[in-house]
Amino acid sequence: MVRVVAVTQSDPFFTGRFFETFLQESAGLPVEIVEIVLLRNFNESSAALAHRLWKLYGTVDMVRLLGRYATARVDEWLGQPRRVEAVAADHGIPVRHLATINDPAYLRTLSIRGVDVLLSVAAPEIFRAAALRAAPHVLNVHCGKLPKYRGMMPTFWALHNGDREITITVHTMAEQVDGGDVLAEYPVPITPDDSAFDLAVRAKRVAGPAVAQLLALLPTPAAPTPRPPDPAFPRYFRFPTGRHAQELRTAGRRML
């Protein structure tokens, strides 16, 4: 049995969809989710996060996004889990809120509990040296081709750049962000009607079962051999701005 602690942030749109499909798939595999650790979204206050999103989406799309958020909360009230913590509760998985994954006291508990994999899924914090050594496997799920799309919101940047597909990459974590060895890649086609929002949701849905199946292979002879990333792409993508969102719209794409 592969014992996993997942580290993420909660939202009702994207990370919830990863864990929805991941937990469904892992239920039939030798993969045990010990707990899900929730960090603060983007590692910033709610007000700062709202301002960040407003600058990206603009007023009209921000209102639409808030409408989707309200709908998701109504769905939860009606019994359909949307946020990570609601999805976890539906599957009986414990959730722990931490200020930082780099808490030495918390990291010491992983070996005591026999955790095999510390799994980052859109975790909003850099894992420091102690975290990178806290379990036999410390892995990240990155919804972009590495190292071509190192950094933040890789699905947005692939759509912005006119790519025909995105690549979900599972890699070992290293001190350089998104710089570890690649374990597996899963291509996801971009359709003509995809918005940035749609593509991010679908990437998370595809990644969930694929990652569960990969983790089940880790203690077996079928485990993939890590390979170093191609050093030809030194760029790091930061969080897009309103200007980048407008460039996306000008190219005929939608944010929502």
Image (cartoon, rainbow, N blue to C red):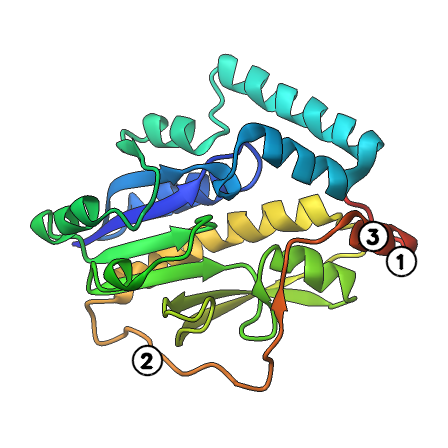
Between 86 and 24, the one nearer to me in the picture: 86
Q: Earlier in the sequence, mark 3 or mark 1?
A: 3
Is residue 55 in sight in this rendering?
yes
Q: Earlier in the sequence, mark 2 or mark 1?
A: 2
- Residue 3's spot in the image, x, y percent? 20, 51
Q: Amino acid at mark 1?
A: Ala
For residue 225, the mark is 2
Q: Amino acid at mark 2?
A: Thr
C-alpha span from label 3 to label 1: 13 Å
Q: Amino acid at mark 3?
A: Arg
- Residue 37's spot in the image, x, y percent? 32, 40
Quarter of the picture holding the C terminus:
top right
| Res 49 quadrant in image | top right
Horizontal relation, residue 211 to residue 190: left or right:
left
Residue located at (73% from left, 67% from top)? 164
The residue to which callout 1 is attached is: 251
| Res 105 quadrant in image | top left
The residue to which callout 3 is attached is: 243
Helix, strand or loop under label 3:
helix
Residue located at (40% from left, 60% from top)? 140
- Residue 77's spot in the image, x, y percent? 50, 13
